Image: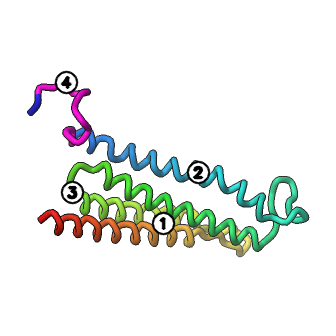
Amino acid sequence: MSMRPLLERPLAELPSVRWILLIPAMIAAWFAVAFAGLLLYGHIEYALCPRDQWISNTCFDPDVDRIMRGVINAFIGLSALAVGGTGVLVAPAYRRCVAWVIFVAGACLSIAFGFVQSHDLGDGAATSDWDSVASAIGAGLAGVLAIDYWLRRARKKAA
């Protein structure tokens, strides 16, 4: 082991620091995508909503509402990709395993949020957020399969 001071060594030489930074980096990636989604949501809604449907800073057009639901789901899927990609980039080793653990944990968390958000409103109406769950799991699965493929391919080229 090198006797150079800890702060002068590159991060690649400090695997324990990278393991410690793994979860904070994934949380930061999630917040970055969530923040971008919040910034863009209002602008997209304002641009799409007909002026006669814009009342008290709210758009009451059902077509725009469906489009905005799609925008929300797109950012949910993007956050799943950002969290998984960040985790794999920060992990110093076992990257394929890390990718699958992140996917399974994210899928479980997403399903739990789906159950929390799905409830009866008491008057026969119900609310559901399962489309968001499907967006997160679908994007996460696509991301983990792509990461797994690229990591296996890189390993074969290195061998």
Task: Examine the rendered structure and indicate whether residue 17 appears above or below residue 130.
Answer: above
- Whether residue 13 is situated above or below residue 96 in the rendered picture: above
Mark 1 highlights which residue?
Answer: 136
Between residue 118 and residue 98, name the one nearer to us: 98
Q: What separation in Å lies between label 3 and label 2 (alpha carbons)? A: 30 Å
Q: Residue furthest front?
A: 157
Q: CA distance from mark 2 to mark 1?
A: 17 Å
Give yes or no for residue 7 being in the magenta stretch. yes
Q: Which image quarter holds the C terminus?
A: bottom left
Residue range highlighted in magenta: 3-15
Evaluate if marks 1 and 3 touch, with contact meaning CB atoms under 8 Å apart.
Answer: no
Residue 139 x %, y %: 45, 68
Pointer 4 residue: 5
Q: Which is in the foreground here, disc 2 or disc 1?
A: 2
Mark 1: amino acid: Ala
Q: Earlier in the sequence, mark 3 or mark 2?
A: 2
**From the viewer's perspective, is 105 left or right of 14?**
right
* Residue 36 screen position, x and y as percent: 58, 51
Q: Which residue corresponds to the image point at 31% horizontal and 55% vertical from the top-left?
A: 88
